[in-house]
Amino acid sequence: MVVNVFISAVTTDTLSRKEAVAWVNNLLKSHFTKVEEMASGAAYCQLTHLLFANSINLRKVKFNPRSEPDILTNWKVLTTAWKDLGIDKPVDVEKMKKAKFQDNMEFLQWFYKFFNANLVGDAEDYDAVGARFNEDLPALKGSSGARPAVAAVRPTAAPVAKPKAVVPAAAPTAAAKASVAPTVRNGTRPAPATSAGTRRSEPSQNEELLKQEIEKQKSLAADWETMAKEMESEREFYYSMLQRVEGLVHEAEELKSTTIDVEALKAVLYQSNEEGEHEVETTENGADSSQLREALQANLDDTDTF
């Protein structure tokens, strides 16, 4: 009998992204490096096969899909098997196949709880590699085949050089003497003259402007990278806050209450200031991240193209 579960922000048995990937790799002896790679649906097919023997024909699963139709085939095989097993989890295939982190992380968190609720016996006894016919999951880069053999080269004897007749050197002519480069005096050689007859000792003005522009663009790229990291951190923070608020809603539904504890809600909304997990970083002159974004945008608008 299948045990259906649901997950909320207050669920205790949740995993971080690294723990979730390591959990899947440990069960399937796979090589996933990020949660987004679960979007192909192949791993869920085999994990279902592990939980419920013979519930899925793994020969129909494309463990390394090369196109979107292959991905859709995997999800169709999975949802059909779940329907036969009585699993009532709705699957939004259109969202999953886009390989977005948030959608795939939520689905993997649910499946982790579902797996633990339905596991019977020891998962270590499952031959994951043999079940998928010794296919890597996903395919390792650079494992396209054996290195082509190189034919052995038979050593040959080196040809014996024939002595050449010595030709006496001709006396230099007057024209040749005139074309000889100036002699070195006092350990220094004079710099070559330009067509205008002047020595080139300093770079042109255009080269200086180009160097300045390159340094300016490097600094701008570093600022954008810093801002991108800040925005990613903010996204993770607000997503975590949303999960906690969702947990409060689920608690109220379980208690059949039409209200939510205000103090608990305040604790969720203001905990960032108390724990210091999401403080606004400032630049050296005291500007916050929003001011930094405005300065970067203004800099992009004023940038000249060379």
Image (cartoon, helix red, strand yellow):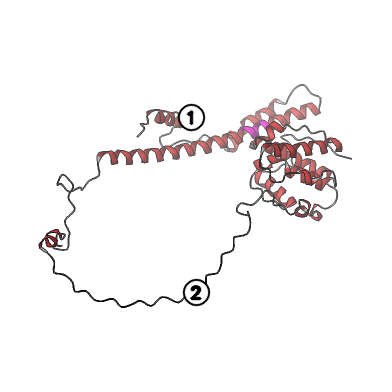
The residue lying toward the viewer, choosing from 111 and 186, is 186
The residue at 46%/31% (across/down) is 293
Q: Of the residues shown, which amino acid type is indicated by label 2?
A: Pro
First in sequence: mark 2 vs mark 1: 2
Q: Amino acid at mark 1?
A: Ser
Residue 283 % position (x, y): 44, 36
Q: Main secondary structure of the magenta part?
A: helix
Q: Quadrant of residue 56?
A: top right
Extreme residue in the right direction: 1
Q: In the image, is 218 to the left or to the right of 41?
A: left
Position of the N terminus by quadrant: top right
Q: Secondary structure at mark 2?
A: loop
Residue 290 marker: 1
Secondary structure at numbered mark 1: helix
The residue nearer to you, when weighing 62 against 218, is 62
Residue at image location 81% in from the left, 46% down from the top? 49
- Residue depicted at x 79% and y 36%: 79
Q: Which residues are magenta?
A: 238-242
Residue 12 lies, in percent from the top left, at 74, 40
Marks 2 and 1: CB-CB under 8 Å?
no
The residue nearer to you, when weighing 31 against 234, is 31
Q: Position of residue 103 (x, y in %)?
A: 68, 35
Which residue is denoted by mark 2 in the rendering? Answer: 155
Q: Position of residue 300 (x, y in %)?
A: 41, 30
User: In the rendered image, is residue 278 in sight?
Assistant: no
Q: In terms of depth relative to the viewer, which is nearer, 49 or 34?
A: 49
How far apart marks 2 and 1 lie (CA) works out to: 71 Å
